[in-house]
Amino acid sequence: MTPGRAAIACLLLSLPLAAVASGQAGPKAAQAGPDEAARAKLDATRGQAQAEDKNVKDLKKRVDALETNSQASRKALEERDQKIAELERQLEAARHP
């Protein structure tokens, strides 16, 4: 065998080993990609969940404030109605002594 053929034979014999080595590294590298993608997706989902939680808390505060204002308005309206009813009674009593 000539030295050129020997070099080619060694190269041909080493190709399957290189393919096996790259095949073993391939799944690990491919596996790292989906893991990183899944982690990024999970982080994004967590971020969205936190944003939604903040939004819900803000909305609850707004609802509480609106309920408080509504109760205050209802009480003021009831007091006004009572005052009007009292003035109507006084007016009616003044008309018919």
Image: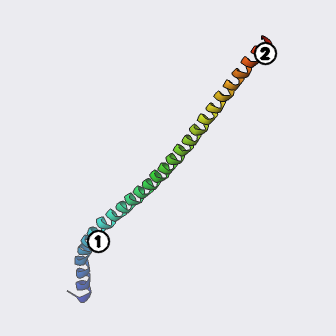
Crowd band around label 2 with a 10 angstrom C-alpha radius: few (<14), some (14–19), many (20+) = few
Which residue has dot 2 on it?
Answer: 94
Q: Is residue 88 left or right of residue 50?
A: right
At a point 26% along the width and 81% down the height, the residue shown is 8
Report the Cα–Cα distance between label 2 and label 1.
Answer: 106 Å
Which residue occupies the extreme left position in the image? Answer: 1
Q: Amino acid at mark 2?
A: Ala
Depth check: give the residue in front, 15 or 3. Answer: 15
Establish if 60 lies above or below 19.
above
Q: Position of residue 14 (x, y in %)?
A: 24, 78
Establish if 53 lies above or below 36.
above
Which residue has dot 1 on it?
Answer: 22
Which residue occupies the extreme front position in the image? Answer: 97
> Quarter holding the C terminus?
top right
At a point 33% along the width and 67% down the height, the residue shown is 29
Residue 17 in which image quadrant:
bottom left
Mark found first going from the N terminus, 2 or 1: 1
